[in-house]
Image (cartoon, grey):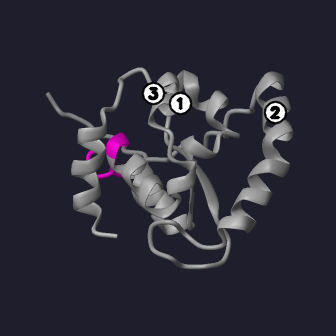
Amino acid sequence: MKRSPLKRTPFVRKHTRIKNASTKRRKRNAEVKPFRQAFTLEVGCCELCGQGGLLDVHEISGGWARSKALDKRYAILALCRGCHTVVEQEPALWSVPRQIALLRARRPHDFDLVAINKLLTRQVDLESVEFAAELIRV
């Protein structure tokens, strides 16, 4: 039996749109925008590498508690885009205790372990934060 050649079509990647934020999320983002802008101006440089310029605000707590952490100084870090990408894409390297240790080293007056543990589903103890602080070498 004679077979005809297969018709191969090139792989075409479908473009997906970014999901629109809900009305509730847009309202919450608008509420915290002035606070976050003032926060990045106050901090002035990346809390990880020290580079100045445009800064992103990174929430240490994610998931359901992220919206509660948007305007809590004890639960956010000011990071440059490069460092923010690294922290987001390498969660094994930048665990929550390590992020809290960075906050403690850079802004000790904002460090509040009890308050941040209220936002987290997995509680972080002081020993793990101190161990992570040794890894940072700030």
132 horizontally vs 29: left or right = left
Mark 3 crowd level (few <14, some 14–19, many ≥20, 10 Å Cα): some
Q: Nearer the viewer, residue 13 or 135?
A: 135
Give coordinates of residue 124: x percent, y percent.
34, 32
Q: Earlier in the sequence, mark 1 or mark 2?
A: 2
Residue matched to label 3:
117
Q: State which mark lies toward you, 3 or 2.
A: 3
Give coordinates of residue 38: x percent, y percent.
79, 59
- Mark 3 and mark 2 in contact? Answer it, CB < 8 Å: no
Can you name the residue that lies furthest to the front here?
109
Location of residue 80 with respect to 52 vertically, above or below: above
Which numbered dot is residue 26? Answer: 2
Which numbered dot is residue 115? Answer: 1
Give coordinates of residue 115: x percent, y percent.
53, 30
CA distance separating discs 3 and 2: 26 Å
Q: Earlier in the sequence, mark 3 or mark 2?
A: 2
Q: Determine if the magenta segment contains residue 103.
A: no
Mark 2 crowd level (few <14, some 14–19, many ≥20, 10 Å Cα): few
Q: Amino acid at mark 1?
A: Ala
Asked where in the image residue 31 lies, by quadrant, the reply is top right
- Residue sitting at 46 percent across and 64 percent down? 83
